Image (cartoon, rainbow, N blue to C red):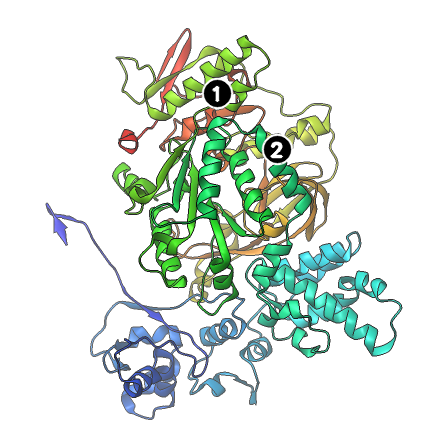
Amino acid sequence: MRLLDYSVQGKTRAITQLTIHLENEQMVTFRSSDDPAIVVTHGKHTMLTRFFELCASEAPENQVAKSALYQDIPKLFRWDTKAKRWVRRKRYQAALGRMIHVSPRDMQRFYMRALLCHRKRPTSFENLRTVDGVTYDSYREAALHAGYHENDSEWVACMTEASQFRMPYQLRQLFATIIVYSQVVEVGTLWERFYCDLSLDFGYKYRSLEGHAKEDMVKFHTLKSLNDLLLAPGSAVAHFEDLPQLCEYPHLVLDSLLQNHLIRREMEGYNHDVLQETVDQEHLLNGEQRSVYSTIINAVDNPTPGNTLFFIDGPGGTGKSLLLEHILAKVRLSGMIALALNDTSTCSIYKQSHLKGLIQKASLVIWDEAPMTHRHAFEAVDRSLRDLMDNDEEPFGGKVFVLSGDCRQILPVVVRGTPAQTIDACLKSSMMWPKFQQLHLRENMPVMSAQNKSTATELAEFSEFFLQVGKGRHEINPALGPDDIKIPKNMLIENPVEELSNDDEDEELRPGVIPIGLARMVDEIALTRLWRNGWKGILEYLSTDSVEEDEEVNFFEQEVLHTVNINGIPPHKLTLKKGAPIMMMRNLNPDLGLCNRTRLRIVELKPHVIHATIMTGEHQGQHVLIPRIVFISDADAREFPFRLRRKQFPVQPDFAMTINKAQGQTVQNLGLYLSTPCFSRGQLYVTLSRVTSRCMFKALVEYPQLEEEDGVYTDNIVYRQIFE
């Protein structure tokens, strides 16, 4: 396609997505009105089964298939969708085959994919499992005996190190993380090797028993504890076929195991004393907060059509998080289920799953930091809940749905998107938006609680300043554009050479962040200065890198892959030090507080495991063990012609963070380094609203648009259409 003689669309190759399924487990789509007999016949043949038939065929035109891998077939054949068969190409066409990605959690299909990547001319599912004349019972066994996967030495070393200094429960947490997020080859072997360490506490608890009774009791409760830990990331012991199974102990299976484990965990997982303490402090809410609180609690107690959707809008400092904490405590203490989501929450819902049961039981759903999320996510959740609740008439299936956030902050990230595309992606552009009741918080809590009038005045002036920044209503310089704002001199860093550490280790690591466009560079500088100041215990961790697509491996040298840095994936060289702050880069276990953006402090560094404590939130002070996990870059990443597979610790130093990462946090002191002007909507507002006072904020603007005696000008990107 061309427009004014310029190409607006181009494609170098036709790409065929190749299905992978177990025998007789292919996906079949049909309409409810279709004849069942035709549906069964139509779904019998797939790309994979027809590939097996090609390899078994003696027809002359099909002989070329016997020397090709499954992923190479689209270069030689085209898929006839109507006839459901491969047809030999009569002329050359640039085409590629790509097998669908399979998670290691789906063990049999994962290893089937590995076999298909290497095995030529398989004639059947059984033949695919045959290696050196031996037919194995599972694809995993076949792949391992064929040598298609690496060994588990990394995970053995990790568990060995951790078992020397942590308790059994922490070891089970670590074991669960490893088998879910890393591609462990022999899960059963790893279990057997460390079973004594994993079950030590139960061995002591049931020490009065003897013989098989003690052995069964210890193993059952160890498995049950492991299963509970696996449920949080959406897995279970039953997903790992080479682990002992809970069903092997029917005489010990409790009634609670037969119930919906998600509902049981939600109902039993809260400290009622803490909930009661929160509810008892309801009188501390200000007038606006109390009004919103009453509105939502009344909707939960008496849900009626048209009164179930709410959006709590409030700038920084108005106490949105405190309000949500009180709402959740009230609902949970009443014996109802309230689900708390954020901008990183993800899930897959099946109608036969326990998650469906949990959602059906939920009386309230709260989604914090909602403006950061793409509107398609809300619309997808709406469709899913209508389906799960069998209620097509009401939004979100009739659930009381509360969104919270600040529309002045950063909007959903649209890669290389225009302002129009970003606005189109935001919540206010959704067809759902008019159905939400707007609840506003305007009272600034630090101002209301100020110790004296002068302090209150100063805090109020600063609050008004960053609100004007967020709305784009600040003073402008006629010589510059409307999106240029002056940062006053008293908020600027005069001398950019600032001390990053002091003599008091605890004071140096108090919760505080530096939103910065060059976070990794600042982390390196900070670690260098800490090393010079005499901190001991520094370690350098190097990743293991490869290319996910097997046919591309030979084209990229290791040293090239080591230089690749992709958002959301830690760097090849990770330099850490005992006592240093770090931040999680992946959701490992939300129930334990190990979520993306969780801040931790390093307690001890081992070659294969990191021992840390959580620094903030309800899990503050909790000890955790963090192993290396496997990261795989997104398939649609445009920067690189491959999918990077990197094995590294899911953390990064936290002396500095990007502006986007700082969103949603409140800190004591903040320094902003703008090596280049802000480039995204709401970034400057986010940095200013992280603190409560002007004296807590300092900025270093490297290339200002204009310098004056009383301040400098820099870009403040605001999409004013959002407020219309």
* Callout 1 crowding tier (Cα within 10 Å): few <14, some 14–19, many ≥20: some
Tell which circle, 2 or 1, labels the residue nearer the N-terminal end.
2
Taking the spot 48% from the left edge, 35% from the top edge, the residue there is 663
Q: In the displayed structure, does residue 215 sit left or right of residue 510?
A: right
- Given the current orientation, which residue lies at the most extreme left position? 4
Q: Quadrant of residue 534?
A: top right
Left or right, 373 with reference to 363: left
Q: Residue furthest front?
A: 302
Is residue 526 positioned above or below 307 on the image? above
Residue sitting farthest toward the top: 709
Residues at marks 2 and 1, CA–CA distance in whole angstroms: 41 Å
Camera sees residue 371: yes
227 to 411, vertically: above or below = below
SS assignment at label 1: strand
* Whole-percent x, y for residue 110 in the image: 50, 71
- Identify the image quadrant of residue 402: top left
Depth check, mark 2 against mark 1: the one in front is 2
Would you say residue 182 is visible in this rendering? Answer: no
Q: For mark 2, does the 10 Å Cα neighbourhood hold few (<14), some (14 to 19), or many (20 or more) residues?
A: few
Decide: is 76 above or below 424: below
**On the rendered structure, is 723 left or right of 332?**
left
Q: Residue beneath label 1, please?
A: 700
Q: Which mark is residue 281?
A: 2
Residue 139 location, x and y as percent?
53, 79
Q: Position of residue 502 (x, y in %)?
A: 69, 23
